[in-house]
Image (spheres, rainbow, N blue to C red):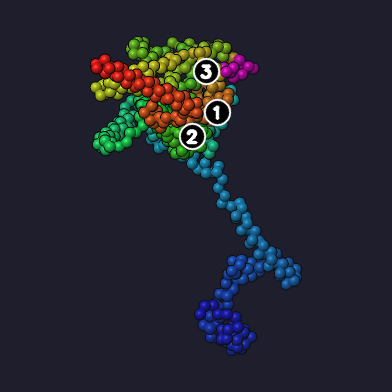
Amino acid sequence: HGPYQPYEPGYGLYQPGYSPYDDQIPDPKSRMLAIQNAKAYLLKSSTTSGLNLYDHLANMLTKILDEQPTNAVDIIENISKDVKWAQFQKKMDTLRDEHEILPTFEAAEKRKALFLKANREGHEELEEDIGETPLPNVMETAFYFEQAGIGLSKDESYHIFLALKKLISVQPIQTCRFWGKILGLEMNYIIAEVQYHEGEEEEETEEEEVIEEGGKEMGEVEDEDEKKEKEDEPPKSTYKPPPVIPKEENGTGANKYVYFVCNEPGKPWVKLPPVTPAQIVCARKIKKFFTGRLDAPVVSFPPFPGNEANYLRAQIARISAGTQISPIGFYQFAEEEGDEEEEGGGGRDTYEENPDFQPLSVAEMVDSLSTWVHHAQSILKQGRCVWLNPFQKSEEEEEEEEEEEEKAEEPDELQQEIGPPLLTPLSEDEGIQNIPAWTAQPSTDLIPQYAVAILRSNRWPGAHAFASGKKFDNIYFGWGHKYSPESHTPALPPPVQAEYPSGPEIAETRDPTLEEELAFKAAREEALAAAEEEEDEEDIAEDDEEEEDD
């Protein structure tokens, strides 16, 4: 039946027997039922405002008793309006101000994990970790770069410091360095350069080799099936794509270091894949801004072989090869390894710290670029640091089958590329038109005795280096693009290949002109006339012979 409506016969307070002025006492059960029905009606919520009359009257009475205005009965309507307005304002406050989580608080929640301390029983373990940790002193490096106006805020530097500490605790890392920060359109990349302990990367390389070998076996089976089906197929294009140049092994060349990236301190570190020569060669021809998402596609021409993670790794390899510098004399070649490598013709690719290094003064480091050297191998046009002949494997494996092809390729043999050797002075770097490759200056001219030597790369804007005594470091803050005095122009598509081999066998004859037709007719008539004369002469000769016989 639901709540009873007002004036419903038999259940209202106005009915005889329910009035408080009646002498007759009604049945208690009926009276309680009437009270419950009346309260249920007052608690009925409005379909428009969501309020009910019971709470509204209670709030009005509370307001009147608290304030005790004069002539309350005359302003009862205003009191009712004020009570409703107060409830309406509370809702607006809730929607506008309350429960609003700013991005700063979200980032702070994510970075809370960086400040959590590990459970330690004593201080001995902490002292051992401090002595053997590969964790770099990011705050000290930031202090030196800060003197030249380079670097991040102290808070962000400290957060990166803690993030690197977390990375070292998870990965088996031997050396670690804060490489820099590459800016993106949506998010940025914080990059850590690490080296694993010996033997840690063997499992990954073995897995990659197994995958490649499996792909080769499947390809050989498909080739055998295709040979059987190709007997009656029409001829196909004779174009042969250039051979795929294999990537350098982990720990050598462009893959000497392993790189981890994250968008913000506190977020998980992601390991970048090793770089391939094809990715480096293609990265030189394109210029794309980073988005901050590693799985984002790279839409470009020529098409890039990979996603943004591969493009980021290729740019890191290019920047490192051109901007990793150190004071001259800090590194030296190992005597035993150097002789063997020189005999091989590949150049020296390893070095070690010089224990007898004597640092130069800041004035000497700033005055001449010959006091700085590159300690990273340069990348050749092939996309590798050490040149590799792409036809060497095919010649060894298929000598008997491809003798004729090899003879045809002999005049077009590739010449070995040789780049500048390690520890080459910066004074030999080529400039950009009228701009030098590097700009050297002290951090301050006001207090020269405490100045720091600062170098800025003009070829890779954002790459910096400092040197102060025996301390030096390199860092990069930028968009990951190489400087070009002219606007970037994408590479043109290659020329269209010939649809079929042209030759006299398939070439159509050309229609003769009028002059050629007349000349042809005249020559033909002359030939016919000459033939008739010869026939007449032969007939005359035969007649003469017959007369002589008679």
Query: As drawn, is 59 to the left or to the right of 257?
Result: right
The circle on residue 300 is 2
Query: As drawn, is 404 to the left or to the right of 26?
Result: left
Q: Which of 490 and 180 is in front in this view?
A: 490
Asked if the stretch drawn in magenta spans residue 444, the answer is yes
The circle on residue 335 is none
Query: Which range is magenta?
Result: 433-448
Asked if 245 appears above or below 111 in the picture, the reply is above
Q: Which residue is drawn at 67% across and 62% down?
A: 85
Magenta stretch, main secondary structure, is loop
The circle on residue 488 is 1
Element type where label 2 sits in the image: loop
For residue 3, say whether it is visible.
yes
Give the residue type that dot 1 points to. His
Q: In which quarter of the image is residue 538?
A: top left
For residue 173, say whether it is visible.
no
